[in-house]
Image: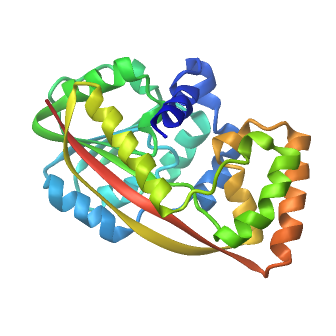
Amino acid sequence: MADLQQQLLNDCYGQDRDTRRHWYSPAATAYQQVRPRYPQALLDQVMEITLLSSSSRLLEIGCGPAIATPAFAQIGCSIMGIEPNPDFFRLAQQTCQPYANVALHHCLFEEWPLEPGQFDAILAASSFHWVTPDIGYPKAAAALRPGGHLILLWNKELQPSADIYSQLSPLYQQYAPTLNRAYEDQATQIAILNDLERMVVKSGHFRAFESGWQVVNVSYSIDQYLLLLSTYSPYLKLEAQQRQNLFQGLRQILEGNGDTVALSYLSAFHIVQPC
C-alpha cells in the first residue's frame, strides 16, 4: 500500500513545474462545482486543536478555487493563499472577494519567497502532494512560528457502493484498465491516510500531533458524478475518446440503477508540528 501511494505521489510532484501549474485547467470549473467540501464539524475540530483565532496568521498552500479557504477566513484570521494554476487562481479571487483578510498570490509554493517564522499555521487542503518534498517540508517548517502547526486536509475519492462498483468494473477493464483498481473500502482509505501521515513524519521535519477523520455520505446526480470523475488526475490523463467511451458506458449502467448515485468518502485531517 505504501509503495503504491508513493508512486501516486511521485506522479503528482514529479511532473515539471509548468505541467503542475496547468494540470487542472481543463477541469477547473468542474472542480469548483462538484469536488466535495470539508465537513464543518471536522474543520471546527481542526481550529480548536490549532487554537486558530482572528489574531492568527495562516498560510494556505495550493488553495485551488478556494474550497477550504472561506471556512478559515470566516474566523477573521489573516490568510495568505498561494495558488499556481491560473484558472484556479481566478476562481479563488472570485470566491474570496468578500474577505478582506485573504490575500492571494499566483505562484508555486516552491517559488514563493519564504517568510521565516511568520505563520501560526499552514494549511494544505488536498494539495501538499503536489509540492516537491525536498523543498516543501523544510520550507513549510521554516515558515511556521514556534508552536505552529501544519494542517493537512484530505477528502478521499468518492466511492459508490461495492455493488455498483462491481457493475462498473468491466467497463474500466475494457476502456481504461489502468483505472480498474481494487475497490477502496473504508479500511483501505484509512490505510492510505495513515501512509500519508507517515510520509510527512518520515521527512524528518515534522512530528505527528493529532489526526482525525469522519465518514461522509452524499448523493450526486449522474451528471454530477461523471463531472466529478473528470476532475480526478487519472481521468485527466485519459485520451479524450477513451474518456468519452468510458463515460458513455458508465452513464448507461448508472442510469439502470436510478437517477442518483449514492457515494461515501473519508474526510480527514493530519496536524503536525516542526521537530
> Which one is nearer the viewer's eye here, 26 or 73?
26
> Which one is nearer the viewer's eye here, 58 or 125?
125
Residue that extends furthest to the left in the rendered view of this protein: 146
Residue that extends furthest to the bottom in the rendered view of this protein: 258
Where's residue 64, x and y in %? 50, 44
Where's residue 134, x and y in %? 36, 17
Residue at 79% from the left image edge and 82% from the top image edge? 258
Q: Answer with left or right where residue 232 lies relative to residue 193.
A: right
Question: Does residue 40 lie above or below 198 as drawn?
Answer: below
Number of numbered discs: 0
Where's residue 38, x and y in %? 42, 62
User: If the image is split into quadrants, where does the C terminus sit?
Assistant: top left
Residue at 65% from the left image edge and 67% from the top image edge? 160
Q: Answer with left or right where residue 153 lies relative to residue 205.
A: right
Where's residue 35, x and y in %? 57, 58
Residue at 39% from the left image edge and 53% from the top image edge? 69
Quadrant in the picture for residue 146: top left
Residue at 59% from the left image edge and 55% from the top image edge? 32
Q: What's the coloring here?
A: rainbow
Residue 97 visible = no
Residue 266 visible = yes
